[in-house]
Amino acid sequence: MHRVIRAVAHADFTLEVVFDDGSSGVIDIKSRLFGPMFEPLRDPAFFQQASVDEFGAVCWPNNADLAPDTLYSEVQRSLS
């Protein structure tokens, strides 16, 4: 399993992520911002509070998170 080691949230609801194997990419997550956990992320100021937890997942203060395996797969698909 790959872990995110760095995540930068951008104003257009994309995440720039770097993984422990050195691969990186930008993922658009705007279409995922629905439901009780993710709707608060539609606030650009809140979205900017993205961080990486001890498991290598991208997370926010309300406990919303994105699994590193899913993000890694998306980055790999975008590279092909």
Image (cartoon, rainbow, N blue to C red):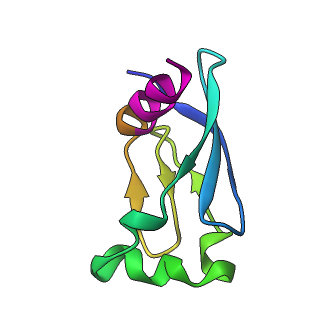
Q: Is residue 49 left or right of residue 31?
A: right
Q: Characterize the magenta stretch by its predominant secondary structure.
A: helix
Q: Residue at x 44, y 26 (%)?
A: 77
- Of residue 4 and residue 9, the one placed in the foreground of this image is 9
Q: Identify the image quadrant of residue 43.
A: bottom right
Residue 51: x %, y % from top left: 61, 55
> Considering the image in quadrants, where does the N terminus appear?
top left
Q: Residue at x 48, y 58 (%)?
A: 29
Q: Is residue 4 above or below residue 36?
A: above
Provide the residue span drawn in magenta: 71-80
Q: Is residue 30 left or right of residue 9?
A: left
The extreme left residue here reads 35
Residue 6: x %, y % from top left: 67, 40
Q: Residue at x 66, y 17 (%)?
A: 22
Q: Is residue 67 left or right of residue 17?
A: left
- Of residue 53 and residue 1, the one placed in the foreground of this image is 1
Residue 35: x %, y % from top left: 28, 78
Q: Is residue 64 visible?
A: no
- Of residue 15 and residue 51, the one placed in the foreground of this image is 15
Q: Is residue 47 left or right of residue 63?
A: right
Q: Within the magenta stretch, is there residue 58?
A: no
Residue 13: x %, y % from top left: 60, 65
Q: Residue at x 66, y 67 (%)?
A: 12
Q: Is residue 72 above or below residue 63?
A: above
